[in-house]
Image (cartoon, rainbow, N blue to C red):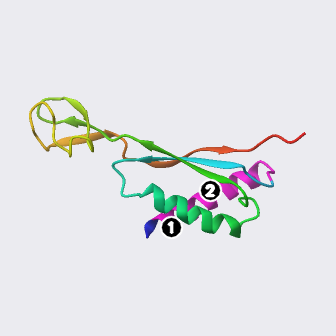
């Protein structure tokens, strides 16, 4: 399950952010997962619940996953369309030949920290 490998990478990056900003903990990590990736959000969520307890700075935090719709551009006619909803086929000309122009990424969008007074 490569989702755990991705999660450990996220944890390393967030740990680095915490050290650079003198933070003891984070409240939430927001990641974006494109539909055109091979990442399964449910596996990320399940894995995070397990590994977050192993790190003091993550204990009690939340993983927020935002799915980004995969958009393709047909190489034949230029139509932009939602890839998954159309099973990869251009709704205008029926071609399968396309470029993915959105929704092929996986990245950390935000690290949330509640201000303490």
* Residue drawn at the location 69% of the way across and 51% of the way down: 17
Q: Distance from label 2 to label 1 (Cα)?
A: 13 Å
Which image quarter: residue 15?
Answer: bottom right
Residue 13, disc? 2
Residue 82 x %, y %: 28, 37
Q: Residues within 10 Å of mark 1 (few under 14, many from 20)?
A: few
Magenta-highlighted residues: 3-23
Task: Name the side, left or right, on which 66 lies relative to 39.
Answer: right
Task: Give the SS element for disc 1.
Answer: helix
Quarter placement of the N terminus: bottom left
Image height of 15 relative to 94, above or below: below
First reached walking from the N terminus: tag 2 or tag 1: 1
Residue 26, disc? none
Residue 41 x %, y %: 46, 55
Q: Are marks 2 and 1 in contact (CB under 8 Å)?
A: no
Task: Name the side, left or right, on which 53 lies relative to 85.
Answer: right
* Residue drawn at the location 73% of the way across and 51% of the way down: 26
Residue 68 x %, y %: 42, 41
Image height of 70 relative to 39, above or below: above
Look at the image and say whether residue 21 sits in the magenta stretch: yes
Look at the image and say whether residue 77 sits in the magenta stretch: no
Q: Which residue is mark 1?
A: 5
Quarter placement of the C terminus: top right
Q: Nearer the viewer, mark 2 or mark 1?
A: 1
* Residue drawn at the location 51% of the way across and 60% of the way down: 44
């Amino acid at each position: 399950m490569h989702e755990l490998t991705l999660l450990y990478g996220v944890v390393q990056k967030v740990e680095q952010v915490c050290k650079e900003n003198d933070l003891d903990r984070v409240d939430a990590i927001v990641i974006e997962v494109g539909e055109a990736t091979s990442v399964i959000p449910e596996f990320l969520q399940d894995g995070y619940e397990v590994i977050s307890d192993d790190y003091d700075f993550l204990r009690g935090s939340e993983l927020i996953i935002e799915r980004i719709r995969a958009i393709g551009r047909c190489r034949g006619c230029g139509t932009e369309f939602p890839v998954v909803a159309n099973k990869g086929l251009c709704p205008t000309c029926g071609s399968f030949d396309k470029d993915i122009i959105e929704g092929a990424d996986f990245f950390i969008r935000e690290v949330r920290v509640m201000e303490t007074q």
